[in-house]
């Protein structure tokens, strides 16, 4: 005997897929408690002999991303918000 299609549908469970975190974004961005996104500065890894000491000191600190980039980071880090 063939079971009805209705009884087969009720027994199958639908599992929703989990959202994946982009690992590259996880290493580069940090979401602060206020919802702002902190990111490190560029241009501090090489060719530092040409740069002034004041510039290198400024590059030590991170920067806060603007609101236009916040949505891009939100897609990459779904569980940080």
Image (cartoon, rainbow, N blue to C red):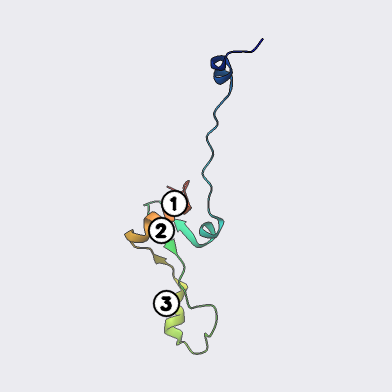
Give the residue furthest to the top. Answer: 1
Of callouts 1 and 3, the N-terminal one? 3
Which of 21 and 28 lies nearest the eye of the viewer? 21
Label 2 Cα crowd, 10 Å radius (few <14 / some 14-19 / many 20+): some
Q: As displayed, is residue 52 above or below residue 27? A: below
Find residue 76 and report its horizontal and vertical position in percent.
47, 53
Q: Nearer the viewer, mark 2 or mark 1?
A: 1
Give the residue number, with chain letter if any, for mark 3.
58
Label 1 Cα crowd, 10 Å radius (few <14 / some 14-19 / many 20+): some
**SS at badge 2:** strand
| Residue at the image point whose x is 52% and y is 34% from the top | 16
Give the residue number, with chain letter if any, for mark 2.
37
| Residue at the image point whose x is 46% and y is 47% from the top | 78
Of callouts 2 and 3, the N-terminal one? 2
User: Would residue 1 be found to the left or right of residue 9 on screen?
Assistant: right
Q: As displayed, is residue 78 above or below residue 64? A: above
Give the residue furthest to the left. Answer: 67
Of callouts 2 and 1, the N-terminal one? 2
Res. 75 mark: 1
**SS at badge 1:** helix
**SS at badge 3:** helix
Give the residue furthest to the bottom. Answer: 50
Quadrant hosting residue 15: top right
> Disc count in the image?
3
């Amino acid at each position: 005997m063939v079971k009805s299609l209705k009884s087969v549908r009720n027994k199958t469970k639908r599992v929703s897929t989990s959202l994946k975190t982009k690992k590259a974004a996880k290493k580069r961005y940090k979401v602060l408690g206020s919802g702002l996104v902190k990111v490190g500065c560029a241009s501090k890894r090489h060719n530092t002999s040409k740069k002034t000491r004041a510039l290198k000191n400024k590059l030590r600190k991170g920067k806060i991303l603007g609101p236009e980039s916040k949505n891009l980071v939100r897609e990459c880090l779904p569980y940080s918000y």
